[in-house]
Image (tube, helix red, strand yellow):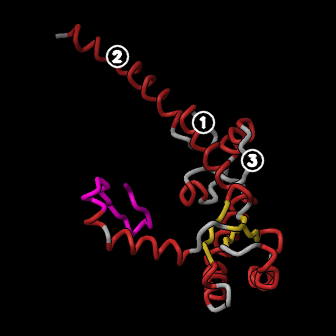
Amino acid sequence: MKKNFYRTLILIPYIGLFLGVNSFSNAEPGNALDFKELKENIKYRLEMGLNADEEYIQEINMNSVDNNSKKKHGIYLTDKELNEIEIRIAKQKEKIPEIKKYISSSSFAPYFSGIYIDQAKGGEINIGFKKNEEDIVKLLNEIKSIYNDDKKIKVFTAKYSYSDLNELNKKIVLNKKELKEEGLNIISFFQFQKIRL
């Protein structure tokens, strides 16, 4: 009985040491990131167009003060980075609906193919039209004035407009039974605007 008691007393410090060593990978400020956390940081930073250098990331984590970036974005950011990201996202939430509204009321609405944001390029707004880019210079200048940042607005020529794709989607849905009889089982995901064949 006493032997078991002494064994337990001897094991307790080792268990505490073991648990303590494993808790260093919890990405708390002042601790180095483990491999998985470092890769997550790199991925997020590349997606958002931030510095993704491993040494830089480790330094930020080691010297980080709580600025709520971990809670908001899942990683530690400098105050400057956090401010940049929050301003960028707030501007996008405000201005993208204005741009869409302007386009939908313009003569170019039938040629509009969509908008996507390239966060890796600092929040670049890419607007697609079925028409040639040269035909939409006036519209582009107006969009740039709405967004208030010439460098962040880019235009690309798309093969299909948003209207074209919606029409195709309607045809597929209407002919779903016939397509299935021909061997194409259509499962549509309207929520995500995708169709799986």
Q: Amino acid at mark 1?
A: Leu
Of 193 and 62, nearer the camera is: 193
Q: Which residue is mark 1?
A: 33
Image quarter hosting the C terminus? bottom left
Q: CA distance from mark 1 to mark 2?
A: 28 Å
Give me the residue at 29% from left, 11% from top.
7
Q: Are marks 1 and 2 in contact (CB under 8 Å)?
A: no
In the visual, does 193 lie left or right of 98? left
Find residue 177 and report its horizontal and vertical position in percent: 25, 66
* Magenta residue span: 179-197
Q: Amino acid at mark 3?
A: Asn
In the visual, does 91 lie left or right of 17? right
Find residue 178 and report its horizontal and vertical position in percent: 27, 65
Neighbours of disc 1 within 10 Å: few (<14), some (14-19), many (20+): many
SS type, badge 2: helix
Q: Which residue is mark 2?
A: 11
Q: CA distance from mark 1 to mark 3?
A: 16 Å
In the image, is residue 184 part of the stretch drawn in magenta? yes
Picture quadrant of residue 39: top right
Residue 105: image tag: none
Residue at the farthest top position: 3
Image quarter hosting the N terminus? top left
The tag earlier along the polypeptide, 3 or 2, is 2
Q: Which residue is mark 3?
A: 51
Picture quadrant of residue 30: top right
Of 160 and 145, nearer the camera is: 160
Give me the residue at 76% from left, 84% from top.
139
Give me the residue at 60% from left, 36% from top.
33
Q: Are marks 3 and 2 in contact (CB under 8 Å)?
A: no
Q: Nearer the viewer, mark 1 or mark 3?
A: 3
Q: Nearer the viewer, mark 3 or mark 2?
A: 3
